[in-house]
Image: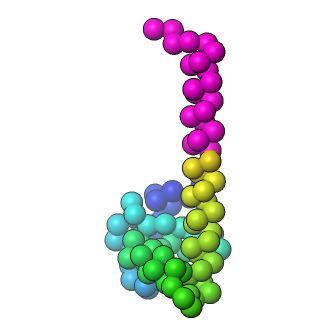
Amino acid sequence: MIESQDIREESRCFITGEPIIDIETARFTCEFDAWISEEGQDIVEEDARAVNPSTENEIIFREWYAQDEADAARWDMALRHLDYDNEFHGDDE
């Protein structure tokens, strides 16, 4: 998984072309091997939900949506596993 500390100092947003200032809110797109700033993310999302989105923005949005759904499913599965353990093994406290 790519983390914010992997952003090079001179990185520019793939969408806006501006330098990425807040590395904590930047997001990576594997499809284009690039970082996208928070402003760029807003542009991607708004355009991807529009009637005629750009191909690039639609690809990036679908990639992120699939990634977010997979992450949510993993969390859900982990929480169900915790509930199962607590139900059948009880709390030791």
For the C terminus, the quadrant is top left
Which residues fall within the magenta stretch? 74-93
Is residue 63 among the parts visible in the rendering? yes
The structure residue drawn at horizontal position 50% and vertical position 72%, both measured from the top left corner, is 35
Number of marks in picture: 0
Coordinates of residue 76 in the picture (x, y in percent): 59, 41
Identity of the residue drawn at 56% across and 19% down: 86
Image location of residue 67, percent across then percent down: 61, 60
37 lies left or right of 52: left
- The quarter of the picture where residue 42 lies is bottom left
Residue at image location 35% in from the left, 66% down from the top: 22
Residue 91: x and y in percent read: 51, 12
For the N terminus, give its image quadrant: bottom right
Magenta stretch: includes residue 81: yes
Q: Nearer the viewer, residue 60 or 16?
A: 60
Residue 70 lies in quadrant: bottom right
Residue closest to the eye, 16 or 7: 16
